[in-house]
Amino acid sequence: GNSVTQMEGPVTLSEEAFLTINCTYTATGYPSLFWYVQYPGEGLQLLLKATKADDKGSNKGFEATYRKETTSFHLEKGSVQVSDSAVYFCALRRVSWGKLQFGAGTQVVVTP
Amino acid sequence: NAGVTQTPKFQVLKTGQSMTLQCAQDMNHNSMYWYRQDPGMGLRLIYYSASEGTTDKGEVPNGYNVSRLNKREFSLRLESAAPSQTSVYFCASREGVRGPTEAFFGQGTRLTVV
């Protein structure tokens, strides 16, 4: 079946540090891949997505590249801010289905 | 821009009590979803509705029922709450079942069953 594995948190960083959150997946076919962000007390928001191999999704300084050869979709940001403190979820959706399969989430804490 | 609205935001129930979580979206979306979020497990799909008049089970449907009341509203009912149902519940909607369209989430309902 489909599954998403992401690194455990919490990840604690200083402001302006480089952030990487690893995400790998198992799926049949060619899923679409997503990163969602959940700020404290809020619901999930789509951060970025990629729908085919080698696509790069980007938004708000975050980037992730769909790597089919390594079945990965790692999230990166070059210089984090305190406002990036949140829980980040990697997710996939098989092209033929509308249901999202989520990873466990990674909490990121950015300190001044 | 209301988006997806869930009520209530917080609820405490005693074991065996029943309740209904309400969800409404104003984006004219066809598909709606109920997830639960538990520490270390991400979000797991409880039930979904691909279109008005249809509902289907997700990964963890036991102990829940749903109603797609109309295109806007999708409710989740706990008939006899159990402590294992303590969780944060999220409703989501999406334009259609297929294709790369984005899912929009409500702010969540934090449910505690004692």
Image (tube, coloured by chain):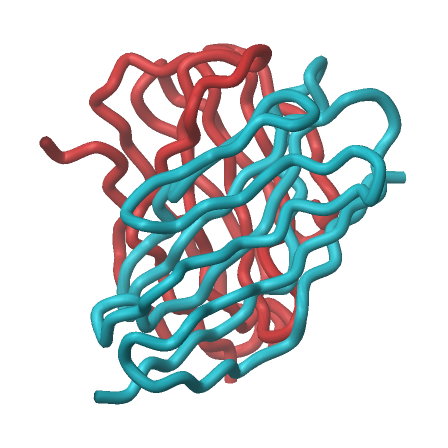
Q: Position of residue B107 (x, y in %)?
A: 29, 53
Where residue A67 sits, quadrant-wise, is top right
Identified at 72% across, 50% down, the residue is: B60
Q: Residue at (37%, 76%) from the top-left corner?
A: A17
Nearer to us in this view, B109 or A39: A39
Quick one: quadrant of the N terminus of chain A?
top right
Could you say which is closer to the camera, residue A14 or residue A104? A14
Residue at x-position 43% and y-position 69%: B111
Q: Is residue B80 left or right of residue A27?
A: left
Q: How many marks?
A: 0
Residue B61 picture location, percent across and down? 70, 45
Locate the C terminus of chain A and report the quarter of the image it occupies. Answer: bottom left
The quadrant holding residue A70 is top right
The one of A93 and A70 positioned closer to us in this rendering: A70
Q: Position of residue B72 (x, y in %)?
A: 30, 21
Check the image and report above or below for B8 versus A40: above
Q: Residue furthest left?
A: B1
> Quadrant of residue A68 in the image?
top right
Residue A91 sits above or below residue A83 on the image: above
Q: Position of residue B67 (x, y in %)?
A: 49, 29
**Chain B on-screen colour:** red
Chain A shade in the render: cyan
> As drawn, is B113 to the left or to the right of A78?
right
Q: Residue at x 84, y 21 (%)?
A: A29
A73 is higher (above) or lower (below) than A107: above
Left or right of B29? Residue A41 is left
